[in-house]
Amino acid sequence: MAAVGWGCALLALLLAAAGGAAALGRPSPVRVLSDGTWRELLHGEWMVEFYAPWCPACQSLQPEWEKFAEWGEDLDVNIAKVDVTEQPGLSGRFVITALPTIYHCKDGEFRKYQGARTKTDFINFISDQEWKSIEPVSSWFGPSSFLMSSMSALFQLSMWIRHCHGYLTESVGIPAWGSYAIFALATLFSGLILGLMMVFLADCLCPSKKHRPPQYPYSKKLAPESAHLLKKLDEEQEADEEDISDDEAEDKEESDRNSSPNAVRQRPVNPAVTADKS
């Protein structure tokens, strides 16, 4: 009898171990998004969690999020998560300022979830369509907009600079001030190159007026008539200038004649010389 009891207990332990192994081997229903796959959010209905492994609130949310993901197929909603430490571009694209942050996505419209963080609340949010009462994010600030794409690139650049700084200080052995100096010189050099490129493009698109030949809009249609008219105007102007110069010369000659002294001057006569002669 005792042997039978021990056999039943052993069988129960084996079944429990098998069930646990099956549960551990079963893949998680939560999908992992990255910079290359985030555009899947633009189609269908999604619930996305942005988290970080070191965040205590994120760690406490993970069990509820996994349980909620098991209902994804029944609710016809995709459950996903994004590790902001591994995907800084998505962190900038969605402007993640607090952790964890949850977004609801429906056919390209994005809404931030602000409710309680339990499995039941998540299920009711989808089944009762509570998301309709939330104002969607403006298209100007949507993840697919140009502004948020630029923000994503900026976040990726900052993470790349951080990795480079760590490599220079830890692997190469350069002091921190030396790494800062390298980045400062690189920034100045890149700014100089971009400035020269902008000046070159501006000069090509909008050349200076000094080098631009004079343009006459009607020169092609009225070329002979315009040339004849210009020639006639030049001749009349030259004739007027000659008449003015002749009049000025005559006026000058007359004024000289009036202002000059008599051509024959009378010499003063000495009275003594006149008496001797007589």
Image: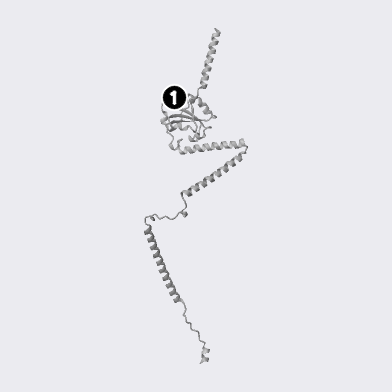
- Residue 229 to residue 92: above or below: below
Looking at the rendering, which quadrant does residue 222 occupy?
bottom left
Q: Which colour scheme is used?
A: one colour
Determine the residue positioned at 41% across, 68% down: 242
Where is residue 246? Give x, y as percent.
Answer: 42, 71
Q: Position of residue 54 (x, y in %)?
A: 55, 29
Residue found 39% across the figure and 62% down from its top: 231
Name the outermost residue toward the top.
1
Q: Which of 170 and 136 is in front in this view?
A: 170
Q: Where is residue 10, by image quadrant?
A: top right
- The total number of labels drawn is 1
**What's the residue at 47%, 39% (across, down)?**
147
Residue at image point 50% right, 48% down:
200
Q: In this view, does 8 lie above or below 92?
A: above
Q: Closest to the observer: 40 or 254?
A: 40
For this orientation, the residue located farthest to the front is 224
The correct choice, above or below, for 176 with respect to 9 in the image is below
Q: Residue 122: horizontal and vertical position, in percent?
A: 45, 26
Q: What residue type is labelled 1?
A: Glu
Q: In this view, does 163 lie to the left or right of 133?
A: right
Position of residue 20 relative to residue 250, above or below, is above
> How far from the left and from the top, in percent, is residue 137?
44, 35
How many other residues sit within 10 Å of disc 1, few (<14), some (14-19) or many (≥20)?
Answer: few
Check disc 1 and report its element: helix, strand or loop.
helix
Q: Nearer the viewer, residue 252 or 140?
A: 252
Q: Label 1: which residue?
A: 73
Q: Quadrant of the N terminus?
A: top right
Q: Is residue 264 left or right of residue 181?
A: left
